[in-house]
Amino acid sequence: MNLDKNEKRYNSKLFRFFDLLYRLLVLNIMTIIISLPIITFFPAIVAMVSTLKYDMSETGIFKPYFRNFKKYFRKSFWMGLALLICFAAGAYAYYFWINVETDLAFMKIIIQIGIVVISICLLILVLLVSHLPQLICIFKDLPNFQIFKVSFYISFRYFLTTLIMLIVNLVAYGSLVIILTLIFTSKKIDEETGKTVLAVHSSVRIMLVIWTMIGISLPKYLGLRFTKPLYYKLEKIDMEKINQQIEEDINNEK
């Protein structure tokens, strides 16, 4: 009898594990496909986060994901577009400053200041982005500007949580950058044609397959688990109280 109970418990845990793995795999692949046009990347990520946060207990995974994609599309699309423009402008400004050549000492100082300012702005933007998907899901009725304000506040007020989200994003997106770099830098000369061709190592191919399967969804899922206490608290607080707390902190700093 005890053996049967242990077997049922084991099978139940095993089933839950593979069910979770299947859901993460489906979410990852759907998010990658929908993100291909670039401008739909942020809505796809928000839909994934919402599904991971609220809908993992549902029978299916396709329907909740596309429901969330439709639900948050307008808000996340415009926010994602604004972020894309800001990142593009910041990257262009950084590229501009590091490529300016001058022999004047004064201009060299200006260039260094410009690089530092742009770097700080990009860092702040990265901190903001770390919290935005969850905040959009929690405060879906708030205007985008207010969500940016809350994200800015949380990024520095709860820096440990921000650090966790940064690590999550670094694993999810940084791993892809590393894989693509390895792919496009792995070249060799073809002995027959004498032309340079890609020579991707099998380990890099395996890494790409794993990333395609769970490279985004698994880090996001773990990030949601680790940051659950903070966001649970935020869900229980009225936005009026949050805005009031932000204003009080700003006034105290003054």
Image (cartoon, rainbow, N blue to C red):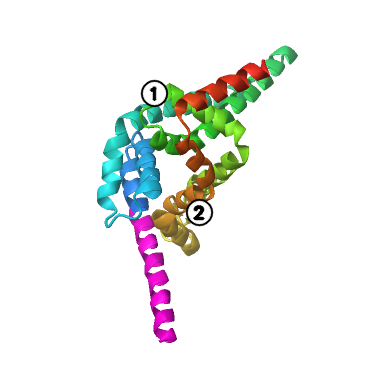
Mark 1 and mark 2 lie on one chain; the one further toward the N terminus is: 1
Question: Would you place residue 76 above or below residue 33 in this image?
Answer: above
Mark 2 crowdedness (10 Å alpha carbons): few <14, some 14-19, many ≥20: some
Left or right position of 81 against 113: left
- Which residue lies at the image location 48% right of the left edge and 28% below the top edge? 87
Q: Is residue 51 left or right of residue 216?
A: left
Give coordinates of residue 219: x percent, y percent.
48, 51
Judged from the image, the secondary structure of the residue bearing numbered disc 2 is: loop
Q: Which disc is residue 186 wearing?
A: 2
Image position of 164 (left or right of 236): right
Q: Amino acid at mark 2?
A: Ser
- Horizontally, is 222 left or right of 66 in the view? right
Q: Is residue 20 visible?
A: yes
Q: Which mark is residue 143?
A: 1
Q: Nearer the viewer, residue 176 or 107?
A: 176
Above or below residue 26? Residue 132 is above
Residue depth check, mark 1 versus mark 2: number of the one nearer the observer: 1
Which residue type does callout 1 highlight? Answer: Pro
Which of the 4 image quarters holds residue 213? bottom left
Q: Do the numbered discs 1 and 2 sit on residues whose CB atoms are within 8 Å?
A: no
Looking at the rendered structure, the secondary structure element under dot 1 is loop
Q: Nearer the viewer, residue 7 or 69?
A: 7
What's the mark number on residue 32?
none
Instruction: Give percent across and percent down for residue 124.
Output: 57, 29
Question: What is the chief secondary structure element of the magenta stretch?
Answer: helix
Give the image location of residue 14, x and y in percent: 40, 71
Q: How many marks?
A: 2
User: In this picture, which residue range is highlighted in magenta?
Assistant: 1-26
Residue nearer the viewer, 49 or 139:
139
| Image location of residue 120, percent across then percent down | 61, 27
> Eyeballing the image, is 178 above or below 242?
below
